[in-house]
Protein backbone atom coordinates (compact mmCIF):
# COMPACT_ATOMS: atom_id res chain seq x y z
CA UNK A 1 0.00 0.00 0.00
CA UNK A 2 1.32 3.46 -0.90
CA UNK A 3 1.27 6.06 1.86
CA UNK A 4 0.74 9.82 1.59
CA UNK A 5 3.61 12.03 2.73
CA UNK A 6 2.86 15.43 4.18
CA UNK A 7 4.22 18.12 6.50
CA UNK A 8 3.55 18.19 10.23
CA UNK A 9 1.41 21.30 9.74
CA UNK A 10 -0.72 19.50 7.15
CA UNK A 11 -1.09 16.54 9.52
CA UNK A 12 -2.17 18.81 12.37
CA UNK A 13 -5.13 20.09 10.38
CA UNK A 14 -6.74 16.65 10.72
CA UNK A 15 -7.07 16.91 14.50
CA UNK A 16 -10.26 18.30 16.04
CA UNK A 17 -11.19 19.75 19.41
CA UNK A 18 -11.91 16.91 21.84
CA UNK A 19 -9.97 14.23 19.96
CA UNK A 20 -8.22 11.57 22.02
CA UNK A 21 -4.67 10.93 20.84
CA UNK A 22 -2.30 8.11 21.82
CA UNK A 23 1.46 8.50 21.35
CA UNK A 24 4.33 6.08 21.03
CA UNK A 25 7.36 6.30 23.29
CA UNK A 26 8.26 6.13 26.95
CA UNK A 27 9.99 9.19 28.36
CA UNK A 28 11.32 11.32 25.48
CA UNK A 29 12.67 8.34 23.46
CA UNK A 30 10.29 7.06 20.83
CA UNK A 31 7.94 10.00 21.30
CA UNK A 32 6.71 11.91 18.22
CA UNK A 33 8.13 15.42 18.08
CA UNK A 34 6.86 17.42 15.12
CA UNK A 35 3.14 16.65 14.80
CA UNK A 36 2.46 17.51 18.48
CA UNK A 37 4.21 20.86 18.02
CA UNK A 38 2.10 21.49 14.93
CA UNK A 39 -1.06 20.61 16.88
CA UNK A 40 0.00 23.16 19.52
CA UNK A 41 0.43 25.79 16.80
CA UNK A 42 -3.06 24.98 15.47
CA UNK A 43 -4.48 25.33 19.00
CA UNK A 44 -2.98 28.81 19.30
CA UNK A 45 -4.58 29.84 16.00
CA UNK A 46 -7.94 28.41 17.03
CA UNK A 47 -7.82 30.17 20.38
CA UNK A 48 -6.91 33.47 18.69
CA UNK A 49 -10.08 33.09 16.59
CA UNK A 50 -12.14 32.47 19.72
CA UNK A 51 -12.68 28.76 19.10
CA UNK A 52 -12.06 26.03 21.70
CA UNK A 53 -9.35 23.54 20.91
CA UNK A 54 -8.00 20.95 23.33
CA UNK A 55 -7.10 17.29 22.91
CA UNK A 56 -6.96 14.37 25.33
CA UNK A 57 -3.47 12.86 25.38
CA UNK A 58 -2.55 9.29 26.32
CA UNK A 59 1.11 8.28 26.41
CA UNK A 60 3.42 5.58 27.74
CA UNK A 61 4.96 7.79 30.42
CA UNK A 62 6.54 11.25 30.30
CA UNK A 63 7.25 12.80 26.90
CA UNK A 64 9.33 15.89 26.12
CA UNK A 65 9.05 19.61 25.57
CA UNK A 66 8.02 18.87 21.96
CA UNK A 67 4.83 17.32 23.33
CA UNK A 68 3.82 18.23 26.88
CA UNK A 69 5.71 21.52 26.81
CA UNK A 70 4.39 22.82 23.49
CA UNK A 71 0.82 21.64 24.07
CA UNK A 72 0.72 23.05 27.60
CA UNK A 73 2.00 26.47 26.58
CA UNK A 74 -0.73 26.52 23.93
CA UNK A 75 -3.29 25.41 26.56
CA UNK A 76 -4.16 22.58 24.19
CA UNK A 77 -4.54 19.73 26.70
CA UNK A 78 -7.90 18.88 28.23
CA UNK A 79 -6.83 15.56 29.72
CA UNK A 80 -3.51 13.79 30.25
CA UNK A 81 -2.50 10.32 31.48
CA UNK A 82 -0.57 8.43 32.84
CA UNK A 83 2.70 10.28 33.79
CA UNK A 84 4.45 13.57 33.05
CA UNK A 85 7.54 15.56 34.03
CA UNK A 86 7.47 18.83 32.06
CA UNK A 87 7.21 22.04 34.17
CA UNK A 88 4.72 23.75 31.83
CA UNK A 89 2.31 20.83 32.09
CA UNK A 90 2.87 20.57 35.84
CA UNK A 91 1.74 24.19 36.16
CA UNK A 92 -1.44 23.47 34.16
CA UNK A 93 -2.21 20.41 36.28
CA UNK A 94 -1.74 22.18 39.60
CA UNK A 95 -3.84 25.12 38.35
CA UNK A 96 -6.57 22.71 37.16
CA UNK A 97 -6.16 23.88 33.57
CA UNK A 98 -5.57 20.27 32.54
CA UNK A 99 -7.22 17.18 34.00
CA UNK A 100 -4.55 14.66 34.98
CA UNK A 101 -5.05 11.00 35.86
CA UNK A 102 -1.93 9.63 37.57
CA UNK A 103 -1.88 5.88 36.93
CA UNK A 104 0.38 2.92 37.58
CA UNK A 105 2.13 2.49 34.23
CA UNK A 106 1.47 -1.24 33.99
CA UNK A 107 -2.29 -0.59 34.09
CA UNK A 108 -2.67 2.11 31.46
CA UNK A 109 -2.81 0.05 28.25
CA UNK A 110 -5.22 -2.56 29.58
CA UNK A 111 -7.51 0.11 31.02
CA UNK A 112 -7.66 1.81 27.63
CA UNK A 113 -8.57 -1.56 26.09
CA UNK A 114 -11.23 -1.99 28.80
CA UNK A 115 -12.80 1.27 27.59
CA UNK A 116 -12.08 3.30 30.74
CA UNK A 117 -10.79 6.27 28.67
CA UNK A 118 -13.31 6.22 25.84
CA UNK A 119 -12.59 6.00 22.14
CA UNK A 120 -9.07 6.56 20.77
CA UNK A 121 -9.32 8.76 17.70
CA UNK A 122 -5.65 8.95 16.70
CA UNK A 123 -2.32 7.25 17.25
CA UNK A 124 0.91 9.02 16.36
CA UNK A 125 3.89 6.70 16.01
CA UNK A 126 7.58 7.54 15.71
CA UNK A 127 9.18 4.90 13.51
CA UNK A 128 12.53 3.94 12.08
CA UNK A 129 10.81 2.26 9.14
CA UNK A 130 7.43 1.08 7.88
CA UNK A 131 6.62 -1.47 5.19
CA UNK A 132 3.69 -1.13 2.74
CA UNK A 133 1.80 -3.86 4.61
CA UNK A 134 2.06 -2.02 7.94
CA UNK A 135 5.03 -3.55 9.74
CA UNK A 136 6.60 -0.77 11.82
CA UNK A 137 10.09 -0.73 13.29
CA UNK A 138 9.62 1.44 16.36
CA UNK A 139 12.16 3.90 17.70
CA UNK A 140 13.95 3.93 21.04
CA UNK A 141 10.86 3.66 23.24
CA UNK A 142 7.69 1.57 23.10
CA UNK A 143 5.29 2.59 25.87
CA UNK A 144 1.63 1.78 25.17
CA UNK A 145 1.59 2.26 21.41
CA UNK A 146 0.70 -1.37 20.56
CA UNK A 147 -2.67 -0.83 22.27
CA UNK A 148 -3.20 2.74 21.06
CA UNK A 149 -2.43 1.78 17.44
CA UNK A 150 -4.75 -1.21 17.63
CA UNK A 151 -7.67 0.85 18.96
CA UNK A 152 -7.17 4.15 17.10
CA UNK A 153 -9.46 5.02 14.22
CA UNK A 154 -6.57 6.65 12.33
CA UNK A 155 -2.77 6.77 12.50
CA UNK A 156 0.00 9.18 11.62
CA UNK A 157 3.61 8.05 11.33
CA UNK A 158 6.62 10.25 12.07
CA UNK A 159 9.33 8.53 10.04
CA UNK A 160 12.49 9.60 11.84
CA UNK A 161 15.48 9.30 9.54
CA UNK A 162 17.87 9.76 12.47
CA UNK A 163 16.85 6.28 13.65
CA UNK A 164 18.74 3.37 12.09
CA UNK A 165 16.77 0.52 10.56
CA UNK A 166 19.17 -1.71 12.51
CA UNK A 167 16.78 -1.22 15.45
CA UNK A 168 14.97 -4.16 13.88
CA UNK A 169 15.06 -7.05 16.31
CA UNK A 170 15.46 -4.97 19.48
CA UNK A 171 11.71 -4.78 20.20
CA UNK A 172 9.45 -7.43 21.70
CA UNK A 173 5.87 -6.41 20.91
CA UNK A 174 3.25 -8.42 22.77
CA UNK A 175 -0.27 -7.60 24.00
CA UNK A 176 -1.71 -9.88 26.70
CA UNK A 177 -5.22 -11.19 26.17
CA UNK A 178 -7.86 -9.41 28.22
CA UNK A 179 -9.83 -11.13 31.01
CA UNK A 180 -11.33 -13.66 31.18
CA UNK A 181 -9.07 -15.14 28.48
CA UNK A 182 -5.72 -13.91 29.79
CA UNK A 183 -3.06 -16.57 30.33
CA UNK A 184 0.35 -16.36 31.98
CA UNK A 185 2.86 -14.01 30.38
CA UNK A 186 5.62 -16.45 29.37
CA UNK A 187 8.63 -14.41 30.49
CA UNK A 188 10.69 -16.68 32.75
CA UNK A 189 14.01 -14.84 32.43
CA UNK A 190 14.77 -11.20 31.66
CA UNK A 191 16.08 -12.13 28.20
CA UNK A 192 13.09 -14.23 27.06
CA UNK A 193 11.54 -12.99 23.80
CA UNK A 194 7.81 -13.66 23.51
CA UNK A 195 6.48 -11.30 20.83
CA UNK A 196 7.17 -9.69 17.48
CA UNK A 197 10.18 -7.53 16.51
CA UNK A 198 7.79 -5.16 14.71
CA UNK A 199 4.54 -3.39 15.50
CA UNK A 200 1.90 -4.62 13.06
CA UNK A 201 -0.74 -2.04 12.16
CA UNK A 202 -3.56 -1.85 9.65
CA UNK A 203 -2.00 0.16 6.77
CA UNK A 204 -5.46 1.39 5.76
CA UNK A 205 -5.60 3.44 8.99
CA UNK A 206 -2.45 5.40 8.12
CA UNK A 207 -3.58 8.86 7.04
CA UNK A 208 -0.09 10.09 6.31
CA UNK A 209 3.64 9.98 7.00
CA UNK A 210 5.71 12.95 8.15
CA UNK A 211 9.43 12.69 7.52
CA UNK A 212 11.62 13.88 10.41
CA UNK A 213 15.28 13.76 11.39
CA UNK A 214 15.83 14.33 15.08
CA UNK A 215 17.42 12.77 18.14
CA UNK A 216 15.39 12.34 21.30
CA UNK A 217 16.75 15.43 23.06
CA UNK A 218 17.61 13.74 26.36
CA UNK A 219 20.12 15.76 28.34
CA UNK A 220 22.99 14.00 30.04
CA UNK A 221 22.55 13.72 33.78
CA UNK A 222 24.83 15.94 35.78
CA UNK A 223 27.51 14.26 37.85
CA UNK A 224 26.03 13.03 41.16
CA UNK A 225 26.52 15.44 44.06
CA UNK A 226 27.94 14.26 47.37
CA UNK A 227 24.52 13.45 48.81
CA UNK A 228 23.57 11.34 45.77
CA UNK A 229 26.93 9.57 45.94
CA UNK A 230 26.42 8.74 49.61
CA UNK A 231 22.90 7.42 48.97
CA UNK A 232 24.23 5.34 46.10
CA UNK A 233 27.03 3.97 48.26
CA UNK A 234 24.53 3.09 51.01
CA UNK A 235 22.29 1.20 48.57
CA UNK A 236 25.26 -0.76 47.24
CA UNK A 237 26.41 -1.50 50.80
CA UNK A 238 22.99 -2.94 51.56
CA UNK A 239 22.94 -5.08 48.40
CA UNK A 240 26.43 -6.32 49.13
CA UNK A 241 25.56 -7.26 52.70
CA UNK A 242 22.46 -9.12 51.48
CA UNK A 243 24.52 -10.95 48.87
CA UNK A 244 27.19 -11.95 51.39
CA UNK A 245 24.67 -13.40 53.83
CA UNK A 246 22.84 -15.33 51.10
CA UNK A 247 19.75 -13.13 51.07
CA UNK A 248 20.29 -12.68 47.32
CA UNK A 249 21.04 -15.83 45.26
CA UNK A 250 24.64 -16.35 44.16
CA UNK A 251 23.78 -15.60 40.52
CA UNK A 252 22.23 -12.33 41.75
CA UNK A 253 18.77 -11.08 40.69
CA UNK A 254 17.55 -8.69 37.99
CA UNK A 255 17.52 -5.02 38.95
CA UNK A 256 14.99 -2.27 38.34
CA UNK A 257 16.19 1.28 38.71
CA UNK A 258 14.34 4.57 38.54
CA UNK A 259 15.59 7.66 36.72
CA UNK A 260 17.99 10.27 38.04
CA UNK A 261 21.31 10.96 39.69
CA UNK A 262 20.81 8.59 42.61
CA UNK A 263 19.93 5.75 40.23
CA UNK A 264 23.01 6.49 38.15
CA UNK A 265 25.19 6.64 41.27
CA UNK A 266 23.93 3.20 42.35
CA UNK A 267 24.55 1.70 38.93
CA UNK A 268 28.05 3.14 38.62
CA UNK A 269 28.94 1.87 42.11
CA UNK A 270 27.63 -1.58 41.21
CA UNK A 271 29.80 -1.50 38.12
CA UNK A 272 32.90 -0.83 40.21
CA UNK A 273 32.17 -3.50 42.81
CA UNK A 274 34.06 -6.70 42.00
CA UNK A 275 32.23 -8.83 44.57
CA UNK A 276 28.79 -8.46 42.97
CA UNK A 277 28.56 -10.75 39.92
CA UNK A 278 27.34 -9.71 36.44
CA UNK A 279 23.59 -9.23 36.49
CA UNK A 280 20.58 -8.58 34.26
CA UNK A 281 18.13 -5.71 34.43
CA UNK A 282 14.36 -5.92 34.07
CA UNK A 283 13.39 -2.30 34.20
CA UNK A 284 11.28 0.39 32.57
CA UNK A 285 14.08 2.82 31.61
CA UNK A 286 17.63 2.10 30.50
CA UNK A 287 19.98 5.06 31.07
CA UNK A 288 23.52 5.89 29.99
CA UNK A 289 24.91 4.12 33.05
CA UNK A 290 23.46 0.77 31.94
CA UNK A 291 25.22 1.00 28.59
CA UNK A 292 28.46 1.67 30.45
CA UNK A 293 27.85 -1.44 32.57
CA UNK A 294 27.27 -3.50 29.44
CA UNK A 295 30.56 -2.36 27.95
CA UNK A 296 32.28 -3.50 31.15
CA UNK A 297 30.48 -6.84 31.07
CA UNK A 298 28.79 -6.09 34.40
CA UNK A 299 25.25 -5.95 32.98
CA UNK A 300 24.69 -8.89 30.66
CA UNK A 301 21.16 -8.05 29.46
CA UNK A 302 18.57 -5.30 29.84
CA UNK A 303 14.85 -5.69 29.29
CA UNK A 304 13.35 -2.22 29.17
CA UNK A 305 10.57 -0.07 27.79
CA UNK A 306 12.87 2.73 26.65
CA UNK A 307 16.52 3.41 25.89
CA UNK A 308 16.61 6.79 27.61
CA UNK A 309 20.08 7.74 26.40
CA UNK A 310 21.41 11.27 26.23
CA UNK A 311 21.85 12.56 22.69
CA UNK A 312 25.63 12.13 22.86
CA UNK A 313 25.29 8.52 24.01
CA UNK A 314 22.63 7.85 21.38
CA UNK A 315 24.98 9.08 18.65
CA UNK A 316 27.69 6.76 19.97
CA UNK A 317 25.29 3.86 20.38
CA UNK A 318 23.71 3.74 16.93
CA UNK A 319 26.94 2.87 15.04
CA UNK A 320 27.72 0.13 17.62
CA UNK A 321 24.26 -1.41 17.73
CA UNK A 322 25.39 -4.82 16.52
CA UNK A 323 27.46 -5.16 19.70
CA UNK A 324 24.35 -4.68 21.83
CA UNK A 325 21.54 -6.06 19.66
CA UNK A 326 21.47 -9.37 21.58
CA UNK A 327 21.73 -7.64 24.98
CA UNK A 328 18.76 -5.21 24.87
CA UNK A 329 15.06 -5.82 24.39
CA UNK A 330 12.41 -3.07 24.40
CA UNK A 331 8.91 -4.10 25.45
CA UNK A 332 5.52 -2.42 25.95
CA UNK A 333 4.98 -0.89 29.39
CA UNK A 334 2.49 -3.55 30.41
CA UNK A 335 5.32 -6.10 30.02
CA UNK A 336 8.23 -4.05 31.37
CA UNK A 337 6.17 -3.15 34.45
CA UNK A 338 4.06 -6.28 34.73
CA UNK A 339 3.46 -7.39 38.34
CA UNK A 340 3.26 -11.07 37.40
CA UNK A 341 6.66 -11.00 35.71
CA UNK A 342 8.26 -8.79 38.38
CA UNK A 343 7.28 -11.22 41.12
CA UNK A 344 8.29 -14.29 39.10
CA UNK A 345 11.76 -12.99 38.26
CA UNK A 346 12.46 -11.70 41.77
CA UNK A 347 13.24 -8.13 40.81
CA UNK A 348 15.20 -5.91 43.21
CA UNK A 349 13.49 -2.54 42.85
CA UNK A 350 15.21 0.79 43.53
CA UNK A 351 13.08 3.92 43.42
CA UNK A 352 13.14 7.46 44.80
CA UNK A 353 10.79 9.21 47.21
CA UNK A 354 9.90 12.84 47.84
CA UNK A 355 9.45 11.95 51.49
CA UNK A 356 9.15 8.93 53.75
CA UNK A 357 7.42 8.79 57.09
CA UNK A 358 8.76 7.13 60.22
CA UNK A 359 6.55 4.07 59.76
CA UNK A 360 7.66 3.41 56.17
CA UNK A 361 4.99 5.17 54.11
CA UNK A 362 6.23 6.81 50.90
CA UNK A 363 5.15 9.97 49.04
CA UNK A 364 6.48 9.86 45.48
CA UNK A 365 4.31 12.47 43.84
CA UNK A 366 3.01 15.48 45.79
CA UNK A 367 5.13 18.30 47.19
CA UNK A 368 3.79 19.15 50.67
CA UNK A 369 0.87 16.87 49.91
CA UNK A 370 -0.87 19.07 47.32
CA UNK A 371 1.29 20.00 44.33
CA UNK A 372 1.83 17.27 41.76
CA UNK A 373 5.47 16.80 40.81
CA UNK A 374 5.60 14.05 38.16
CA UNK A 375 3.50 11.02 39.04
CA UNK A 376 3.64 7.55 40.55
CA UNK A 377 5.09 6.11 37.32
CA UNK A 378 6.12 2.49 37.59
CA UNK A 379 7.31 2.63 41.19
CA UNK A 380 4.12 1.00 42.49
CA UNK A 381 4.27 -1.79 39.91
CA UNK A 382 7.75 -2.75 41.07
CA UNK A 383 7.50 -1.89 44.77
CA UNK A 384 4.49 -4.04 45.54
CA UNK A 385 5.86 -7.07 43.70
CA UNK A 386 9.63 -6.86 44.17
CA UNK A 387 11.86 -9.45 45.84
CA UNK A 388 13.30 -6.50 47.78
CA UNK A 389 11.80 -2.99 47.54
CA UNK A 390 14.20 -0.09 48.18
CA UNK A 391 13.25 3.58 48.41
CA UNK A 392 15.84 6.34 48.71
CA UNK A 393 15.84 10.10 49.22
CA UNK A 394 18.08 12.77 50.74
CA UNK A 395 17.51 13.17 54.46
CA UNK A 396 16.85 16.91 53.98
CA UNK A 397 16.12 19.35 51.17
CA UNK A 398 16.46 23.11 50.68
CA UNK A 399 19.55 23.32 52.84
CA UNK A 400 17.86 21.64 55.77
CA UNK A 401 14.61 23.63 55.75
CA UNK A 402 12.71 20.47 54.77
CA UNK A 403 13.10 17.05 56.36
CA UNK A 404 12.34 14.25 53.92
CA UNK A 405 11.74 11.96 56.89
CA UNK A 406 8.45 13.14 58.42
CA UNK A 407 5.93 11.95 61.02
CA UNK A 408 3.34 11.16 58.34
CA UNK A 409 3.65 11.53 54.59
CA UNK A 410 1.45 14.33 53.27
CA UNK A 411 0.38 12.14 50.34
CA UNK A 412 0.54 8.33 50.37
CA UNK A 413 1.64 6.54 47.19
CA UNK A 414 3.14 3.43 48.79
CA UNK A 415 2.08 2.13 52.17
CA UNK A 416 4.47 0.63 54.71
CA UNK A 417 3.19 -2.80 53.63
CA UNK A 418 5.09 -2.49 50.34
CA UNK A 419 8.38 -0.95 51.48
CA UNK A 420 11.29 -3.10 52.67
CA UNK A 421 14.25 -0.73 52.81
CA UNK A 422 14.55 3.06 53.25
CA UNK A 423 17.90 4.67 52.41
CA UNK A 424 19.09 8.25 52.84
CA UNK A 425 22.51 9.86 52.91
CA UNK A 426 22.46 9.21 56.68
CA UNK A 427 22.09 5.44 56.44
CA UNK A 428 19.94 2.37 55.82
CA UNK A 429 16.75 1.25 57.57
CA UNK A 430 15.88 -2.41 56.98
CA UNK A 431 12.18 -2.60 57.84
CA UNK A 432 11.58 -6.27 57.09
CA UNK A 433 9.94 -8.18 59.92
CA UNK A 434 9.48 -5.12 62.13
CA UNK A 435 6.33 -3.81 63.77
CA UNK A 436 5.39 -0.12 63.34
CA UNK A 437 7.15 1.13 66.47
CA UNK A 438 10.32 -0.78 65.59
CA UNK A 439 10.21 0.64 62.07
CA UNK A 440 9.86 4.17 63.42
CA UNK A 441 12.80 3.76 65.79
CA UNK A 442 15.00 2.37 63.03
CA UNK A 443 14.12 5.02 60.44
CA UNK A 444 14.68 7.86 62.93
CA UNK A 445 17.98 6.42 64.12
CA UNK A 446 19.40 5.43 60.72
CA UNK A 447 17.84 7.75 58.13
CA UNK A 448 16.79 11.06 59.70
CA UNK A 449 19.09 14.07 59.62
CA UNK A 450 20.56 14.98 63.05
CA UNK A 451 18.66 18.29 63.00
CA UNK A 452 15.37 16.36 63.00
CA UNK A 453 16.02 13.24 65.09
CA UNK A 454 14.98 14.88 68.35
CA UNK A 455 11.80 16.31 66.85
CA UNK A 456 10.82 12.95 65.37
CA UNK A 457 11.39 11.22 68.69
CA UNK A 458 9.26 13.91 70.36
CA UNK A 459 6.49 13.13 67.89
CA UNK A 460 6.74 9.43 68.56
CA UNK A 461 6.12 10.08 72.29
CA UNK A 462 2.80 11.78 71.44
CA UNK A 463 1.22 8.57 70.21
CA UNK A 464 -1.91 7.64 72.15
CA UNK A 465 -1.52 3.89 71.94
CA UNK A 466 -2.55 1.42 69.29
CA UNK A 467 -0.25 -0.55 67.02
CA UNK A 468 0.77 2.51 65.00
CA UNK A 469 1.22 5.34 67.54
CA UNK A 470 0.31 8.35 65.43
CA UNK A 471 -0.95 11.62 66.84
CA UNK A 472 -3.63 12.78 64.42
CA UNK A 473 -3.42 16.34 65.71
CA UNK A 474 0.36 16.56 65.28
CA UNK A 475 0.96 14.30 62.26
CA UNK A 476 1.51 17.22 59.87
CA UNK A 477 3.32 19.54 62.25
CA UNK A 478 6.45 19.45 60.06
CA UNK A 479 4.49 20.46 56.95
CA UNK A 480 2.53 23.12 58.82
CA UNK A 481 5.73 24.60 60.24
CA UNK A 482 7.19 24.87 56.75
CA UNK A 483 4.05 26.48 55.34
CA UNK A 484 3.94 28.98 58.22
CA UNK A 485 7.64 29.73 58.78
CA UNK A 486 9.57 28.24 55.85
CA UNK A 487 11.47 25.83 58.13
CA UNK A 488 10.32 22.39 59.34
CA UNK A 489 12.73 22.68 62.27
CA UNK A 490 10.26 25.13 63.81
CA UNK A 491 7.74 22.35 64.42
CA UNK A 492 6.59 22.65 68.03
CA UNK A 493 5.20 19.47 69.54
CA UNK A 494 4.85 20.92 73.03
CA UNK A 495 1.46 22.38 72.17
CA UNK A 496 0.15 18.90 71.40
CA UNK A 497 1.14 17.41 74.77
Image (cartoon, helix red, strand yellow):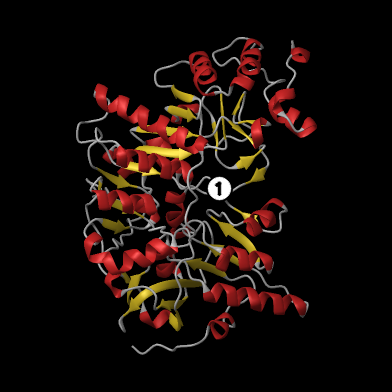
Residue 446: image x %, image y %?
A: 49, 20
Secondary element under disc 1, as helix, strand or loop, is: loop
49, 388: nearer the viewer: 388
In-image side of 426 versus 308 (left or right): right
76, 240: nearer the viewer: 240
Residue at horizontal 38 percent and vertical 64 percent from the top: 314
367, 418: nearer the viewer: 367
Residue at horizontal 62 percent and vertical 23 percent from the top: 407
Residue carrying label 1: 375
Residue 333: image x %, image y %?
A: 39, 54
Examine the rendered structure and indicate whether residue 20 appears above or below residue 208.
Answer: above
- Please tell me in which quadrant of the rendered image residue 241 appears: top left
Q: Quadrant of the C terminus?
A: top right
Residue 412: image x %, image y %?
A: 57, 34
In-image side of 374 versus 494 (left or right): left
Residues packed near mark 1 inside 10 Å, few (<14), some (14 to 19) or many (20 plus):
many
Amino acid sequence: MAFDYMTAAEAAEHFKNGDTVGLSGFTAPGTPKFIPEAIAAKAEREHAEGRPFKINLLTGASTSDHVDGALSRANALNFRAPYQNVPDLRKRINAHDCHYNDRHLSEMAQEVRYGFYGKVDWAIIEAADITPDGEVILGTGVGNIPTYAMLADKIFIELNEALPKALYGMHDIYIPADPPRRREIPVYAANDRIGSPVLKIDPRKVVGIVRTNSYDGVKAFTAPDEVSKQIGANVVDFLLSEYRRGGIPKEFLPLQSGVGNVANAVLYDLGENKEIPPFMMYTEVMQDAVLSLMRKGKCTFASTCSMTFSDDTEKEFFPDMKEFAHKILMRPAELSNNPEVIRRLGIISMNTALEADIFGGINSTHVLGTKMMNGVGGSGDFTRNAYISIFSCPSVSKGGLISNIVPMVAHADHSEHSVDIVVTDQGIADLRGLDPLQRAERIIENCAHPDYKGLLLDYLKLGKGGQTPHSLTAAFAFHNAFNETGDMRNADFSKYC
